[in-house]
Structure formats: structure tokens, C-alpha cells
Image (tube, rainbow, N blue to C red):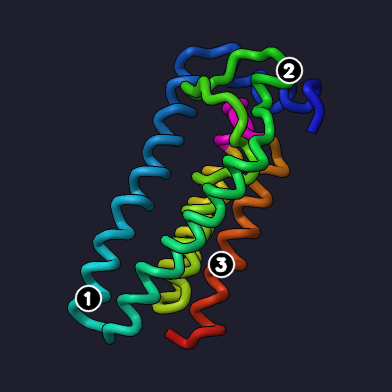
Amino acid sequence: MTKEQYLKWSAPYRGSKRRQNALKAADRLVTASVFISYPVFVLYTAFYRSQRALLGTIGIPAAAFFAVSFFRRRYSAPRPYEVWDIAPLLNKDTKGKSFPSRHVFSVFVIGMTYFYYQARIGAVVFLAGAALAWIRVVGGVHFVKDVAAGAAFGILAGMCFWVLGV
């Protein structure tokens, strides 16, 4: 993605305070809805599934999250607003730690958790993850490669459910 592409994609939002607010609200709504639903699913798993399933539901996403966070901190890729000297549309002032997107990674690994047990719910979460990826790019806080890697890592981490058979 180039600065020109970013400016073209974000132009409809930059010209309207209402659209900027809608983008920010969508970012918060998608993030909160997925992140709040996950503990509810953990509780459901605790009451209606095996202890092994509960350990997998908690352990796989948690281990993957810590691995991605560790990698991100070490690699510390710059964010679009650092590289291009732009004002992001989403409220963010973090320096570095852009690759991979942890928001998108988290939504996709949670989506894989749902998908393993309830494919329809997982598919809905994947759509929310794709929307969040777009929002994070248009919002100027991630490059396309950041969100693509976050989604890919989330999917790969979630494949542990099938490998481990939890």
C-alpha cells in the first residue's frame, strides 16, 4: 500500500466528521462485540463441554496472543502515520508495534475458536474480522500487510484445535 492508495481509501472519511465518527464507532463496536462474546463462550464451554475443550478454548488463543505480542514488540514495525506523517482517523499514538495487527489477529483466533465448535458463529466472526481489518487500514493505524498477517496468524493458531483435537 502506498500513501496515495491510503489517501484515496480514506478520503471519504477525511472529508466528513460524521463518517470519521462512524468509523471510530465501528472500530469500537466490532472490537467490543467480539472481545465480550469470547468470555461468554468460555463460560459456555466450562458448563457444557469437556475440561479439555475448556483448556483449548482458553489456552490456544492465549498462547498465540502472547507469541504474537512478543514478536510484535521485538519486530516493532512502524505504523502508517509514522511512515507517512499523516493524522490517523482512529485514536492512536503508539510508536511501532504495527506488524501484525493484534486486533485483527485476536478476532481471527477467536473466530477459529468459534468455528471449531460452531461453524456459523465462526463465519460471522470472520466477517467481523474482515470489517475490522478494513477499518484499521482506512483508519491509518495499520498497513494492509499488518492486518493480512494478523488474520493469517489467527487462522494458523486456530488450526491447533484440529491438530490437537481439543
Q: Secondary structure at mark 1?
A: helix
- Residue 18, label in figure: none
Q: Is residue 42 visible?
A: yes
- Which sits earlier in the primary sequence, circle 3 or circle 2? 2
Which disc number belongs to residue 84? 2
Instruction: Looking at the image, tell me whether mark 1 or mark 2 is earlier in sequence order.
Output: 1
* Residues shaded magenta: 135-142
* Residue that mark 1 sits on: 46
Examine the image and state in which quarter residue 121 appears: bottom left
Q: Is residue 137 magenta?
A: yes
Point 18% across, 78% down: residue: 47
Quadrant the C terminus occupies: bottom left
The residue singled out by tag 3 in the image is 157
Q: Position of residue 93 (x, y in %)?
A: 52, 20
The residue at the far left in this view is 47
Q: Residue at x 64, y 36 (%)?
A: 76
Tag 3's secondary structure? helix
